[in-house]
Amino acid sequence: MRDADNAELHGVAVKTIRRWRRLYQRRGASRGQTHLAPPCPRCDEGPLDGPAYAELLGWYLGDGYISLGRRSVFNLHIYNDVRYTDLNARLLVLMRTVKPSSRPHTRRVPGAIVTTVSWKHWPCLFPQHGPGRKHEREIVLDEWQRALVTAFPADFLRGLFHSDGARVKNWATRVVRGEKRRYEYPRWQFTNRSEDIRRLCGWALDLVEVAWRQSGPWTLSVSRREAVLRLDGLIGPKS
């Protein structure tokens, strides 16, 4: 059937029919094959859930990496503490959302759960992938990634803080009426050895107007009471 006739039959544009046909040919699929990998948002103009991607990007920059498997298929791995059952379940949802119809799986290693999903196009979505450790190479977001983080900064921060962050109790002493008293207060800390990733975290905190400071060589802290409360509301508990 001619593309024009096929387009008229299905009520879509001719260029849509041509794109669908190219996708089948590119994947080597037969006409009767229906279980295809989802189209890549970057290569094939496939859909991309912005909030889920921004959050998964934060997880990848924190405790994730990509490895090359068989048949030129890449594997996205996210490590997370075994104690955080809700977050480990959340990772499965994020991966299925970013790669529709996928089947991520988990494995247990000492003290952690590794959540993994395979796709040929993970380097398209995470161009920060490269040889060596992330803190030993430059980490810069592409313009389309910066646009998504700007649109969904809270989701990006949720991935960062839930991977490489912690909500801790700090304390200080103060003399009141001649008596030394101890006061405890919560704060969020984000620790990463990559200066580029810490800079991205600070940039996203600025986007949501959460005050922060560099409290250590590898650590950013959110300590002011109103800032901690705001960040609590944006990213939720780490559980």
Image: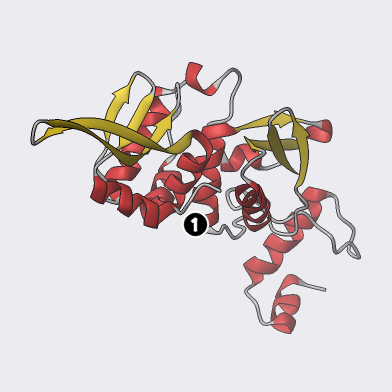
> Relative to 72, does residue 29 appear above or below in the rendering?
below
Residue 24 placement: quadrant? bottom right
Q: How many marks?
A: 1
Residue 86 at what x, y percent from top left?
A: 62, 52
Residue 204 relative to residue 32: left or right: left
Residue 152 appears in view: no
Which residue in the rendered view is the most extreme toward the left?
Answer: 177
Q: Secondary structure at mark 1?
A: helix
Q: Position of residue 87 (x, y in %)?
A: 60, 49
Instruction: Look at the picture and state if 198 lies above or below 230.
Output: above
* 155 on left or right of 41: left
| Residue 97 in view | yes
Quarter of the picture containing the N terminus is bottom right
x and y percentages locating residue 199 in the rendered image = 34, 31
Q: Which picture quadrant has residue 107? A: top right
Name the one closer to the observer, 50 or 185.
Answer: 185
Q: Residues within 10 Å of mark 1 (few under 14, many from 20)?
A: many
Q: How is the image coloured?
A: secondary structure
| Residue indicated by mark 1 | 51
Out of 45 and 17, give the one closest to the viewer.
45
Residue 2 horizontal side relative to residue 50, left or right = right
Residue at image point 75% right, 76% down: 6
Residue at 73% x, 27% y is: 110
Residue at 59%, 24% in the rendered image: 130
Viewer-side residue, 156 vs 69:
156
- Disc 1 marks a residue whose amino acid type is Pro
Which residue is drawn at the image coordinates 15% and 32% (left, top)?
179
- Nearest the camera: 116 or 169? 169
